[in-house]
Amino acid sequence: MSNEEVSNVAIAPNAKRLLIAGFMAIFAAGVGMGIRNGILDNWGREFGFTSGQLGDIMGAAFLGFCPGIILGGVICDKVGYGKLVIAAFALHVLSAFVTFAAVGGQPQTTAYNLLYWGMFIFSFANGTLEAVANPLIATLYPHNRAHFLNLLHASWPGGMILGTVAGWILDDKMQVNWKIQLALYLVPTAAYGLMFFGQHMPKSEASVKGVKLGDMFKEVGILGALVICYLLSLFFGGKLGLSATWSYTLAGALLLVVAVMTRFSMGSFLLFVLFIAHAMVGAVELGTDGWITNITGNLFTSEKGRFLFIWTSAIMFTLRFCADFLEKKIGLSPVGILLSCSILACIGLNLSSGIVTFGGALFALGVYAVGKTFFWPTMLAVASDRFPRTGAIAISMMGGIGMLSAGLIGGPGLGYCKDRFAGEELKKSNPALYEVYKAPQPSKFLNIPATAAYGFDGKKFGDVEAKVASIRDEITKAGGDPKTALEKLTPEERAVHEAGIAGDRKTLRTDSFIPATMAVIYLLILLYFRTIGGYKPVHIKTAEPADRVPAPVA
């Protein structure tokens, strides 16, 4: 894409205020995520959850995003952005009430359900807001979407930084109740409500041009719908508890609806590939983010784990202001940026799996952070650039796919890996001790019986980790080396702790296969664009893009 085609000119006089309002909306989600990442261990100790259960709860913090952003994306031009903002605001407040209803002494199942659905409602609100913010910014800045969508999504790591710092002080330093910590996300929630209030918001290019809803879905087609319907079938079965028959029936019915609406258009194969790639983005970026504080906290200390999370988030926050530089000065197309990032993310995760020193962790996680920085917003920009006829539909579905993947594959998948690898390590080194610390229920991936593996009992393992953290804090305050903390554990406690560390390392190595696969996909897409004259944004007034697959006659 040439420099002449890139422009920062907006199409509306209130574009800057709307950009800031959208920034604050996603910022609120980031604050909530940053705080939740830091209180995972609190929930594990208070309610006795396993890593798999905690992963499921964190997964719910993404799962509600999908119906929120897809439903919002479909109806946003019909009902108006303002009504969706009001609905999201109400849901953000409701999620606080549901989450805070979980208290110590309740049956574990009750506490689990309250936390799970509290996170689900929160993520539904986040999805509804992104159904507004993403197409809105893509519409306001049609000549430089990659830059401005990256600016918009700089709010996510920015919110995580604030949430993590607040949790660091309130949890580690002041030991404030986790409910008070989590309530802080309501402050930016009030801010975005005020910023959006009374503002006129333009409709998408497709809506202005009079493209009908069925035509908006044509480039998504059966192929694109197949991706999200498969993920929805997993949600229906794994999270709603429906049978496999009902899960596939409901997903199949939704697929049929799209097929009928589009007159059985297969859709764009390129958009289908982008949907697959974004499912991987959700798993490797958001899924890993949900666990990185916990993993690095086990390797070092809880305090250093939080600092490393802040470090990676600060890198993301800063670099998301630089997408314009990469396009205009370096000459990378959005797809070139994605290819470079996937390679760096793969390298960073492999380096992170072998970290021993804190300095090494700064470097390894820094590489990973640079890699994951541009994934999400740049993918939205590519979909918006190449498929304007879909209006808000394609980028809303893409966001839903990413969050569903994070909730169904990323977060739970890493929790499952931690359980499986740590359990296998202890079983290999000390079978008798493994039987003592083994969780009462097995962890499973995607609820597949063949994947069943026993991790550690959350309460017992949490007690060991709390003891390690306490000893490390005492040694640090005395000016000693916190690495000597393990010498003060019993042989059994040390074996359990070291098995947990081994599980963490193997989990990160396994995670690195996702960006490696993404790199191959982006390379193929890059080569494809070179065969058709290079990457260029498409506008509805121009000829149809070469990568669109015509709809067959029904």
Image (cartoon, rainbow, N blue to C red):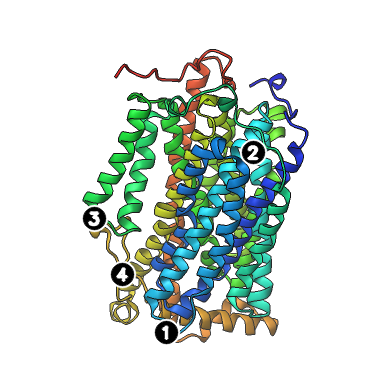
Q: Give the structural element (helix, strand or loop) at label 1.
A: helix
Give me the C-alpha separation between circle 4 and circle 1.
Answer: 22 Å
Q: Nearer the viewer, residue 438 or 122?
A: 122
Mark 4 against mark 2, which lies toward the viewer? 2
- Can see residue 37? no
Q: Amino acid at mark 4?
A: Tyr
Please give the residue where the numbered disc 3 appears in the rendered image: 243
Please give the residue where the numbered disc 4 appears in the rendered image: 454
Q: Tell whether 376 sits left or right of 168.
A: left
The answer to whether the residues at label 1 and label 2 have Cβ atoms under 8 Å apart is no
Give me the C-alpha separation between circle 4 and circle 2.
Answer: 42 Å
Q: Give the structural element (helix, strand or loop) at label 3.
A: loop
Give the image quarter of residue 204: top right
Q: Earlier in the sequence, mark 4 or mark 3?
A: 3
**Mark number displayed over residue 491:** 1
Q: Amino acid at mark 3?
A: Ser
Please give the residue where the numbered disc 2 appears in the rendered image: 149
Q: Position of residue 349 (x, y in %)?
A: 51, 52
Mark 2 nearby-residue class (10 Å; few <14, some 14–19, many ≥20) = many
The answer to whether the residues at label 4 and label 2 have Cβ atoms under 8 Å apart is no
Q: Earlier in the sequence, mark 1 or mark 2?
A: 2
Q: Earlier in the sequence, mark 4 or mark 1?
A: 4
Q: Give the structural element (helix, strand or loop) at label 2.
A: helix
Q: Please state, as top left, top right, bottom left or bottom right, where the N terminus lies in the image.
A: top right
